[in-house]
Image (tube, grey):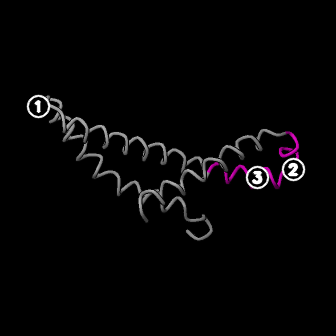
Amino acid sequence: MPESTFLQRLNDLVARFEEISLLITDPAVIADQKRFVKLTKEYKDLDSIMKARKEYLQILANINEAKEILNGQDLEMKEIAREELDAGQKRLPELEEEIKLLLVPADLQD
């Protein structure tokens, strides 16, 4: 999955996460236990995805920042940036796989 499509899919889930965040505090939803339980489970699932998304975005930002520093003159900073770039490039595909697993509905994982 191309990075932009992957990010777009994650970004699309943000609105749903925010919507559920509001719904589970609504007294009418709380009174409807069946709906409340369903939304709470969905919230929990999306919360894990949102945390992973935040880490993913941070790694992308770190990679971009490291690339900018590597174009600079400061040799000491270049070494740190190279390490940061290597770590980010190693972690990014691992995190993508973790997120893809989180995106699979729970009933399909059983």
Identify the mark at residue 34; answer none if there is no mark: none
In the rendered image, which quarter contains the C terminus? bottom right
Compute the Cα span from label 2 to label 1: 61 Å
Identify the mark at residue 75; answer none if there is no mark: 1
* Residue at left offset 30%, top offset 37%: 65
* Residue at left offset 30%, top offset 43%: 63
- What range is drawn magenta here? 27-44
The amino acid beneath tag 3 is Val
Q: Is residue 30 magenta?
A: yes
Q: Which residue is mark 2?
A: 32
The amino acid beneath tag 1 is Leu
In the rendered image, which quarter contains the N terminus? bottom left
Q: Main secondary structure of the magenta part?
A: helix
Q: Which residue is mark 3?
A: 37
Instruction: Please tell me whether residue 58 is drawn above or below residue 33 in the rendered image.
Output: above
Labels 3 & 1 near each other (Cβ < 8 A): no
Q: Is residue 81 magenta?
A: no
Give the image quarter of residue 72. top left
The amino acid beneath tag 2 is Asp
In this view, the residue in front, 91 or 60, is: 60
Compute the Cα span from label 3 to label 2: 9 Å
Q: Secondary structure at mark 2?
A: loop
Count of numbered badges drawn on the protein: 3
> Would you say 15 lies left or right of 62 here?
right
Instruction: Please tell me whether residue 93 is drawn above or below residue 84 in the rendered image.
Output: below
